[in-house]
């Protein structure tokens, strides 16, 4: 068998669990950094006397950074490797987190959070690509979805830590809140020590010996590496150091780029706004002010995390396409209720937020799985970077616009806009979502590869069909 079949059909072992934990560290840190600002904003706005524009930019700066980091550093990850970029981006995250402690005005804070966003943007294509290229076929969708679980763990932890610091030291302790992300970053760096390079990437770049060494170190307990054929499942580029992104403008990849970018943006626009300004939104609904609203935000974060758990099971049993379609439909419904009845009883408001958070689990885990599966190895990180970057336009616009929406429209119309965006995501999935359940990574990416059973490696894999 060749290397692709060896990886796709491998047993899920301790090595894979350790790799999932290492890759999960990035999303945990990402969720933490993007969410801790929600609680810190109370003290920041008071100390710097920020305008509405500055408040919006503080909330959205990291998202703008993610846009540029993903679109620029995704191709770099395809060019120089997943492992090296993994180390660089984490150092930048830790350093920028420390610098936030020393800022003297709102614009310095905006710049440091922009830099942090650049590193977070790099982490999405790195973690997705590295993990997808090591995972067995039968656990790929589930384990890629676990990365999103990590994001929500980080977000919930940020809300809990922020609440505790706020409760003990008051809103003026915002610098210490932001500094805690550097501590978490140091922990993630320790977990990532020894993370292996992707043998699929190594093979595509002509480094057969390194690919063989990586496979032997990871899977020698279940296969004889000397009997594995090291042949690429895709045609090697004329210049392996170049990443030819023109393939993403060809069929079927252009449609896949549009699909992943669209559903991603239309989901995270409302979701990131709710995460970043959770306490503010709860306050607008009359559900407490100050740290009480922060505690409510902790509860919402935990429910978002809980929504991912059943989705992780369904993604491998029910399939990607039905999961994402039904979840988008069920996410839009409570947002419409909040928009139409903003003065509803507290129980109804809480129920709507809980329902939205629970049903968001399907699209949330597929934000990580879909882009990692349906593109070939040599442009996988680039494709993930592009889809992540486009999605952050929606996230940044939602986060930037929400304070203005609350100030000039009120909570009802603002929630209606979020509902309409989510309904648009439902339509995108109905017409464009593909099914990749049970496919090898090469099949899902449209590459030529061996099937799990004995068959010719020269057979072409048919293009995915929308069912």
Image (spheres, grey):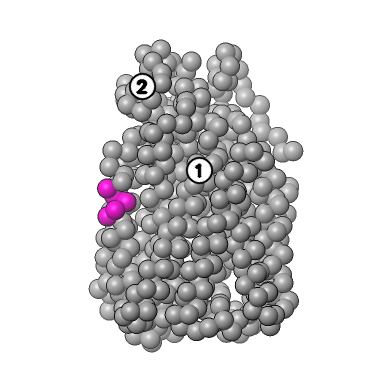
Disc number placed over residue 220 in the picture, else none = 2
The boundaries of the magenta stretch are: 186-190
Is residue 423 left or right of 181 when viewed as pictured?
Answer: right
Q: Is residue 116 left or right of residue 301?
A: left
Which residue in the protein does label 1 denote? 144
Q: Are marks 1 and 2 in contact (CB under 8 Å)?
A: no
- Select label 1 or label 2 by which is in front: 2
Marks 1 and 2, how far apart at CA: 23 Å
- Percent position (x, y) of residue 289? 50, 84
Residue 103: image location, x then y, percent:
28, 75
**Residue at image location 73% in from the left, 49% down from the top:** 430
Please report the residue visible at 56 percent of the width from the left and 29 percent of the height from the top.
Answer: 440
Name the residue nearer the viewer: 112 or 168.
Answer: 168
Question: Residue 78's quadrant in the figure?
Answer: top left
Q: Residue at x 27, y 48 (%)?
A: 190
Q: Nearer the viewer, residue 127 or 165?
A: 165
Q: Residue 259: give x, y in percent of width and height.
A: 63, 48
Please say whether residue 287 is visible from this viewpoint. yes
Q: Position of residue 432 (x, y in %)?
A: 69, 46
Looking at the figure, which quarter contains the C terminus? top right
Up/down of 287 relative to 461, above or below: below
Q: What is the magenta segment's predominant secondary structure?
A: helix
Q: Residue at x 55, y 60 (%)?
A: 304
* Rendered view: 288 above or below 429: below
Q: Secondary structure at mark 2?
A: loop
């Amino acid at each position: 068998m060749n290397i692709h079949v060896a990886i796709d059909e491998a047993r899920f072992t301790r090595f894979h669990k350790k790799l999932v934990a290492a890759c999960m560290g990035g999303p945990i840190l990402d969720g933490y950094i993007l969410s801790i600002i929600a609680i810190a904003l109370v003290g920041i706005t008071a100390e710097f006397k920020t305008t509405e524009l500055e408040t919006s930019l503080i909330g959205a700066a990291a998202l703008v950074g993610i846009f540029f980091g993903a679109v620029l550093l995704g191709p770099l990850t395809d060019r120089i490797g997943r492992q090296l970029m993994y180390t660089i981006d984490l150092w930048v995250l830790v350093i920028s987190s420390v610098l936030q402690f020393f800022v003297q005005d709102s614009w310095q804070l905006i710049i440091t959070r922009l830099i942090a966003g650049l590193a977070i943007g790099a982490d999405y294509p790195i973690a997705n690509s590295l993990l997808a290229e090591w995972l067995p076929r039968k656990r790929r969708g589930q384990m890629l979805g676990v990365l999103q679980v990590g994001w929500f763990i980080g977000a919930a932890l940020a809300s809990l830590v922020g609440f505790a610091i706020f409760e003990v030291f008051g809103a003026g302790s915002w610098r210490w809140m932001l500094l805690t992300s550097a501590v978490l970053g140091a922990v993630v760096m320790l977990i990532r020590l020894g993370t292996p390079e992707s043998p699929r990437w190594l093979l595509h770049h002509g480094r057969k010996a390194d690919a063989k060494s990586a496979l032997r170190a990871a899977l020698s307990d279940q296969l004889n590496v000397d009997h594995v054929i090291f042949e690429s499942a895709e045609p090697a580029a004329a210049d392996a150091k170049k990443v030819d992104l023109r393939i993403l403008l060809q069929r079927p990849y252009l449609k896949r780029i549009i699909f992943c970018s669209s559903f991603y943006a239309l989901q995270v626009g409302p979701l990131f706004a709710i995460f970043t300004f959770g306490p503010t939104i709860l306050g607008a609904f009359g559900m407490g002010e100050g740290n009480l609203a922060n505690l409510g935000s902790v509860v919402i974060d935990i429910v978002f995390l809980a929504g991912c758990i059943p989705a992780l099971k369904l993604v491998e049993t029910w399939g990607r396409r039905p999961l994402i379609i039904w979840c988008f439909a069920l996410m839009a419904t409570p947002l419409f209720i909040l928009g139409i009845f903003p003065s509803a009883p507290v129980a109804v408001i809480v129920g709507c937020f809980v329902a939205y958070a629970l049903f968001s689990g399907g699209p949330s885990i597929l934000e990580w799985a879909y882009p990692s599966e349906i593109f070939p190895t040599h442009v996988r990180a680039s494709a993930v970077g592009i889809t992540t970057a486009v999605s952050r336009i929606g996230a940044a616009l939602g986060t930037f616009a929400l304070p203005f929406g609350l100030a000039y429209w009120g909570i009802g119309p603002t929630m209606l806009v979020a509902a309409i965006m989510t309904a648009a995501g439902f339509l995108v999935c109905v017409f464009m979502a593909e099914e990749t359940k049970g496919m090898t990574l090469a099949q899902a990416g449209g590459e030529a590869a061996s099937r799990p059973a004995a068959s010719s490696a020269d057979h072409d894999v048919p293009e995915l069909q929308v069912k």
